Amino acid sequence: MNLRKESAKPSGFVRVVEMKGILYGIGIGPGDPEHITLKAVRMMKEVDIIAAPGKVVKETTAYKIAVQAVSEIADKELLPIYMPMVLDRKQIESDHRKGADAIEECLKKGKSVGFITLGDPTVYSTYSYVEKLVKDDGFETAYISGITSFCAAAASLGIPISEWQEPFHVIPAVHQLGDKLDLKGNYVLMKSGKKMAEVKEILAKSGRNVTMVENCGLENEHRYFSVEEIPDDAGYFSLIIAKENRER
């Protein structure tokens, strides 16, 4: 427990004030343990508790990646934050609240918590929802940046996402995708797996150069270099880069 001694008063008594722990959202990159930053490694070693989104921390993808780089976390206290993927807004909010409450109980004891999350905690991360609740309740929180999945995917494919003055648009395709990709510049489509057949139709009509990485950085990574190559049953961790065809 973190304790801070305050200056002695004239009476000679020293008042000891209990200090709250800090919550850190630690980005561990998309899959390859070597993509974990030095700062993330240091923070995972320093925190008292490792939290991860799932029923059992050691069974989560995030933990399996992180422990390869930081073996010390295997001996730390682990905190599961169960937040299943559902569409019921009330249940989602309830799960976020339960997760925040569990973390706050640890912080009240003066323990620091490292919430490990794939990619970067600022990009479509469940950590951000829990962090806001914890912060609003008066606790100190922080973000530890990690390599994003779309940057790692582009590197794996051997292509730049954008050049010169090209803009690029990041869209969570499983949640929102129109019937055309008509904005100037390039697109990154994340979390497309469940709607891959629909996404492929839109990509084919767009006339863009399409590439995709499935399970970037993991042992079962696959790369695809055209719409036709992409399987309809591609997994959840599928990231598409659709670039303007400069020959048109």
Image (cartoon, grey):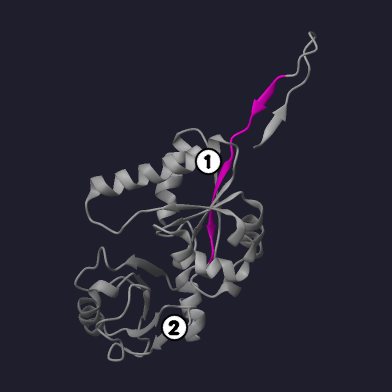
Residue 111, given in percent of the width and then of the height, sits at: 59, 42
Residue 1, given in percent of the width and then of the height, sits at: 64, 37
Which residue ends up furthest to the top in the rendered image?
Answer: 11
Q: Residue at x 50, y 75 (%)?
A: 152
Mark 2 packing: few (<14 Cα in 10 Å), some, or many (20+)? some
Give the magenta part as a residue range.
Answer: 15-28
SS category of the residue bearing label 2: loop
Q: What residue type is labelled 2?
A: Glu
Residue placed under numbered mark 1 in the picture: 106
Mark 1 packing: few (<14 Cα in 10 Å), some, or many (20+)? many
Question: Is 102 included in the stretch rendered in magenta?
Answer: no
**Depth check, front residue: 246 or 127:** 127
> Magenta region's main secondary structure?
strand
Q: Which amino acid does label 1 sit on?
A: Cys
Q: Which mark is residue 221?
A: 2
| Relative side of 185 to 161, left or right | left
Q: Does residue 49 appear anywhere in the picture?
A: yes
Task: Determine contact: label 1, label 2, CB under 8 Å.
Answer: no
Q: Which mark is residue 228?
A: none
Q: Residue at x 33, y 90 (%)?
A: 226
Instruction: Give the quarter of the image for residue 40.
Output: bottom right
Which quadrant is home to the C terminus?
bottom left
